[in-house]
Image (tube, rainbow, N blue to C red):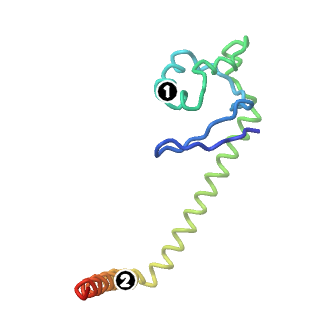
Amino acid sequence: MIRLAWGVLPSVQFVRLQNEYKNVSAPVGLATYDQDLADKVYSIYREDFERLGYDRDSWRDGQSDVPAAQKAVIPEARFYDEIIERNIIISGLYAERDRLRADLKRVSRLHLMPLVNGLASLRRSARALVSKMRGAARAKSGARR
């Protein structure tokens, strides 16, 4: 469990991890994460590292004596599970897209856009008229004083 405390900097909102907890990633293997990549990440996110109190070399904490070739391998079952989950999500997105397209076709058959645009224009005109009337009333009441 990770406890988060919200902090606010001038016009910047950030999350600070409490000292007794640590943001730990799932151990998938760090074979492709080396000092060169760590330096690049640090140079890009230096302000975040400093603001959140991350140690720039904390990536080494997950390193072990397991050879790099073995660390880069995940179980085949997990690999297939991830692919299946991704495909289910993509399938759901396609279904949602198709549903929204069908809804759009139904709505566009009603030819309501000119009506909506006309109402929006009428609202803008009414607001401008009310604003003008208020300004005239203020000017009139100011002239009486």
Tell me if residue 31 comes above or below residue 25 in the rendering: above
104 or 135, nearer to the observer: 135
Per the image, label 1 sits on a secondary structure element best described as helix
Tell me if residue 123 comes above or below residue 38 in the rendering: below
The amino acid pointed to by label 2 is Arg
Question: In the visual, does 26 lie left or right of 134?
Answer: right
Tell me if residue 42 comes above or below residue 140 in the rendering: above
111 or 13, nearer to the observer: 13
Picture coordinates of residue 74, whole percent (x, y):
72, 28
Marks 1,2: beta carbons within 8 A:
no
Residue hosting label 2: 123
Picture coordinates of residue 72, whole percent (x, y):
67, 22
Disc marking residue 46: 1
- As measured in the structure, the alpha-carbon distance from the residue carrying label 1 to the one carrying label 2 is 49 Å
The amino acid pointed to by label 1 is Arg
63 or 128, nearer to the observer: 128
